[in-house]
Image (spheres, helix red, strand yellow):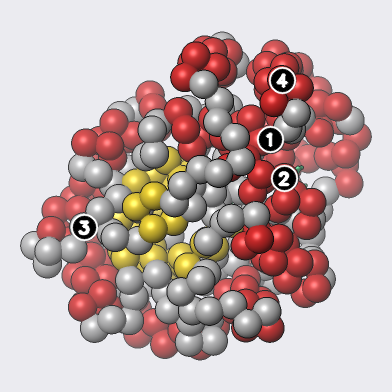
Amino acid sequence: MLEKRELGRSGLQLSPIGLGCWQFSKGENTAGRYWDSLEDTTMQEIIRISLNGGMNWFDTAEVYGSGASERVLASSLDAMDIGMEEAKIATKWWPMARKASSIEATIEARKDALNQRPIHLYQIHQPFSLSSVEQQMTSMARLHRTGKIGAVGVSNFSQKAMIESNEVLDTFDIPLASNQVKYSLLDRTIEKNGLLDAAKEHQIAVIAYSPLEQGLLTGKFHEDPSLIQQTAGPRKWMSKFRSSGLEKTEPLIQTLRYYAEKYDVTPSQIALNWMVQYHEGHVFVIPGASKPKHAEDNAGAMAFSLTREELLHISDESWKVQ
Ligand SMILES: NC(=O)c1ccc[n+]([C@@H]2O[C@H](COP(=O)([O-])OP(=O)(O)OC[C@H]3O[C@@H](n4cnc5c(N)ncnc54)[C@H](OP(=O)(O)O)[C@@H]3O)[C@@H](O)[C@H]2O)c1
């Protein structure tokens, strides 16, 4: 089993894989309609299986169903009697048309949505607040100092904004723990634009979202392209889910299948194992799940280790389909 590791220099010990909880938005608000609405019992089961499989943290956000995801996460953990420190919670402030003052003004609403569970990692969801990075990080530092939040993170921040965030926090003696960005074997932008190298240099962890490229890297849509028509949100209109897109990425899926057979695991597990091992502990992943079996599958990606030679081979095959 892959060990827990520190998120940047935050002191927070997290499993390399956490559960992404956007799927728990219950179809509420625009962000929530991206996914099918799930039953409460299904979500609780997904959470239970994730914890049993060795995940010790959950990534949610204010904007996921206007708090619906936070509420179902907290009520499920409460119903299963999971201790406050047994399950670590990462959530995010939504900056749209808001100033930094809203970070502190809305923190009690986030705590209420989470049934007063601790916020172990609080992230700025997007870099488009009406206030400067300095003002946002100053608000985050105040919340950290008063114990309202644990570690401080950002999401979708450019290399420049990430480094500036780190510098502002540094004046308060607080490290920037992480930058949550899109990253997968089918999207290696952060390796091309220098963000990942800069994060490594400053010991800021990368939390990779959409690590399975929203299901594409499981190979299920390559196996049965008609599946995409049964999904609720906009994925069916994206070129990568159409036949030409599937054809382009098929060679990488074949590579994942090859190693899946070798290790008696699934292609998704190979993709996730690659993500958390290739950069030697620097990258965390948060695959979402809409079924309990997804959670079981994804947690199982921490139960084996690809060799360095295999990691390099998968990397080479992935570059060919970028
Ligand atoms: N910070 C940000 O701006 C941002 C943006 C996007 C996501 N996120 C976070 O990152 C998390 C993950 O990203 P994501 O949901 O976009 O993409 P993802 O994790 O790559 O894909 C999740 C989807 O893949 C399918 N899936 C997952 N595991 C599977 C398995 N083992 N077997 C078969 N299918 C499987 C499911 O699709 P079906 O539902 O079709 O079965 C699931 O809904 C989110 O939940 C959220 O917490 C953050």
Q: Quadrant of the C terminus?
A: top right
Using a 10 Å C-alpha cutoff, classify the residue at mark 2 as few (fewer than 14 neighbours), some (14 to 19) or many (20 or more).
Answer: some
Q: Is residue 158 above or below residue 36?
A: above
Amino acid residing under circle 1: Ser
Return the x and y of residue 267 as percentages of the image width and height.
71, 30
Give the number of the disc on residue 268.
1
Q: Does any portion of residue 230 appear in the rendered image?
A: yes
Mark nearer the N terminus (3 vs 2) = 3
Q: Which mark is residue 175?
A: 3
Structural distance between the alpha carbons of marks 4 and 1: 14 Å
User: In terms of sequence position, does the residue under pointer 1 or pointer 2 come before the other?
Assistant: 1
Label 2 belongs to which residue? 297
Quadrant location of residue 215? top right
**Which mark sits nearer the N-terminus, 3 or 1?**
3
* Quarter of the rendering containing residue 264: top right
- Is residue 28 shown above or below 304? below
Which mark, residue 262?
A: 4
Q: Hey, what amino acid is under mark 3?
A: Pro
Q: State if disc 2 and disc 4 touch (CB < 8 Å).
A: no
Say which label, 4 or 2, has the lower sequence index: 4
Which residue corresponds to the image point at 51% horizontal and 43% vertical from the top-left?
2
Label 1 or label 2, whichever lies nearer to me, is 2
Q: Residue at x 59, y 55 (%)?
A: 54
Residue lying farthest front? 1
Give me the C-alpha separation between circle 3 and circle 2. 33 Å
Query: Mark 1 or mark 4, which is nearer the start of the sequence?
Result: 4
Q: Are marks 1 and 2 in contact (CB under 8 Å)?
A: yes
Is 77 left or right of 292, judged from the image as shown? left
Classify mark 1 as within 8 Å of ligand 1 or not, answering yes or no: yes
The N terminus: image quadrant: top right
Residue in view at x 40 percent, y 31 percent: 279
